[in-house]
Image: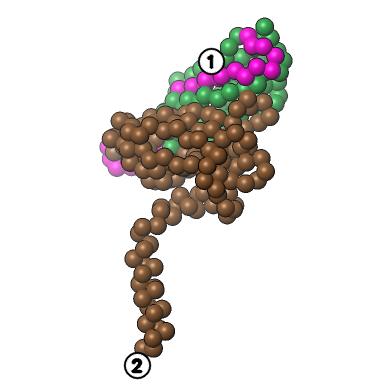
Amino acid sequence: MEISRRETLALCLGAAVLTMMPFRANAAVEDAISAFTGGADVAEGGVTLTAPEIAENGNTVPIEVSAPGAVSIAVFAAGNPTPGVATFNFGPLAASQSAATRIRLAGTQDVIAVAKMADGSFAKASATVKVTIGGCGG
Amino acid sequence: MASGVKPRVKVPKTAAAGEAVTIKSLISHKMESGQRKDKEGNVIPRSIINRFTCEFNGQMVIDVTLEPAISTNPYFQFEATVPEAGEFVFTWYDDDGSVYDTKKKIEIA
């Protein structure tokens, strides 16, 4: 069988896509984020995510999220067995769209905060946290 | 239900009308993630608090959905506007159906 130039190109492209796959950010996180945004575009900026650069204990990592004008903020951990961390929904009496809590991180990974703004748009911020001791039992 | 669950919240006793106050809340709860295994290698079933809400005089301040990635003894800090004297109601919802709540009154200074 003869392979045409077009087919060769298609094969090469397929191979390239396959090798790229592992480099794609954790698919579970992307799924979780698109479940929250409904597939809408997410802009960078407009959200502040405060997390330590290095966390000695992954069992309690203090984080703080803030997004002026947001109706809700969802936090995701890209390297955890389940990516969801928490969703904050702000009511009419919230003085500022910010909250602080403590989270578990299984290892060194990115923490992502996605905010849903009052006008229906989405914004995100991420921070990399180095974890010395993971927070998932074991 | 998880034993020894004790909610604790810190709210100022007084505030000026319309002032923003910082609220800190903590509840003692083991927040079993459902990922850990016991000595025999069996998965310890998930048992967490899955929702936390704070209301002031019936109006919502914050409503948080918790996932297993929230640490043991879930802690939250946030800000609330106090338009008039009244009462904050904090509610925690456990996976097993238990509901824990605590109330804090605030006066207008």
Is A4 drawn above or below residue B82 in the view shown? below
* Label annotation for residue B61: none
Gap between marks 2 and 1, in whole Å? 77 Å
* Protein chain holding label 2: A
**Which-is-in-front pick, marks 2 and 1?**
2
Whether residue A35 appears in this view of the structure is no
Principal SS element in the magenta part?
A: loop
Q: Residue at x 63, y 9 (%)?
A: B14
Figure quadrant of residue B4: top left
* Label annotation for residue B10: 1
* Label annotation for residue A1: 2
Front residue of this view, candidates A97 and B103: A97
Residue A75: percent from the left, percent from the top?
Answer: 49, 39
Tell me the quadrant of the picture where the C terminus of chain A can be found.
Answer: top left
Mark 1 crowdedness (10 Å alpha carbons): few <14, some 14-19, many ≥20: few
Figure quadrant of residue A51: top left
Q: Residue at x 49, y 19 (%)?
A: B6
Segment tinted magenta in the rendering: B14-43
Whether residue A47 appears in this view of the structure is yes
Mark 2 crowdedness (10 Å alpha carbons): few <14, some 14-19, many ≥20: few
Residue A26: percent from the left, percent from the top?
Answer: 41, 52
- Tell which chain the image draws in brown: A
Chain B color in figure: green
Q: In the rendered structure, does residue B20 fall within the stretch colored magenta?
A: yes
Q: Residue at x 49, y 22 (%)?
A: B26
Amino acid type at mark 2: Met
Front residue of this view, candidates A38 and B68: A38
Front residue of this view, candidates A107 and A136: A107
